[in-house]
Image: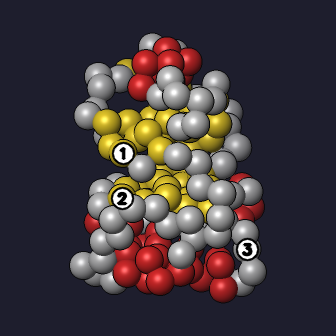
Amino acid sequence: MTAVPPQPLRWERREPPLPAAAVAATDPAAIAALAAATLARLADGISLRAAADAATLLVLGEPEDLPWADGARYLAWEAGALVPTTARPHPATTLWRDALAPDPTTRLALLPDAALVFTPPTAAPDRAALARLAAPTGTAPGGLG
C-alpha cells in the first residue's frame, strides 16, 4: 500500500450512510487497536483481508465481520474507491479514482487525512505481522496478505 500526499478535498455529510466494506486506521494507537481487534476476529473464524504500510492499516470484509477500534474509520465502496461511510468527497469519487489510481490492478481509499493507493489483498492477513502492529511500537513494512 502506498500513501499519496493528501489532496485538498471537501466533504459533505452522507445520509443515509453507505454499508461498510472496510475499516482503516492511520494513527499509531488506532492502528494497534485495529490490528488487535482484527486478530480477535480472525481467531473467531471470521474471514478478513488486510493491507498495511508503516502509516496505515486497512482491513476489508463483510460489514458484520469488520472489527471495531477506537479511532478507526469505516469505509464503503463508491465508484470503485473506498470512501467514509458517512461522507461524500467533492469533487466526485470517480475523478479522484481516475487521477490517483488509474491502474486497474490498484484501488483507492479516500480518507479525510489521506489518499491511499493499494493492491487489493487476496489472502488472509499474516497473523504475525498483525501481532507486530498490535504491539505499541509495531510496524509492518509491506502487505499483510
Image position, residue 67 (x, y; %): 60, 67
Q: Across the whole image, how many numbered discs are drawn on residues? A: 3
Q: Are marks 2 and 1 in contact (CB under 8 Å)?
A: yes
Residue 52 found in image quarter: bottom left
Is residue 69 among what the camera can see? no
Residue to which mark 2 is pinned = 53
Secondary structure under tag 1 reads strand
Q: How is the image coloured?
A: secondary structure
Residue to which mark 1 is pinned = 2
Which mark is drawn over residue 46? Answer: 3
**Marks 1/3: CA distance?**
26 Å
Question: What's under tag 1, amino acid-wise?
Answer: Thr
Image position, residue 110 (x, y; %): 45, 35
Q: In the displayed structure, would residue 27 be above or below residue 6?
A: below
Q: Residue at x 35, y 70 (%)?
A: 140
Question: What's under tag 2, amino acid-wise?
Answer: Asp
Q: In the displayed structure, would residue 126 be above or below residue 31?
A: below
Query: Position of 120 compared to 28: left or right?
Result: right
**Camera-side mark, 1 or 3:** 1
Query: Position of 102 compared to 6: left or right?
Result: right
Is residue 115 among what the camera can see? yes
**Marks 2/1: CA distance?**
7 Å
Secondary structure under tag 2 reads strand
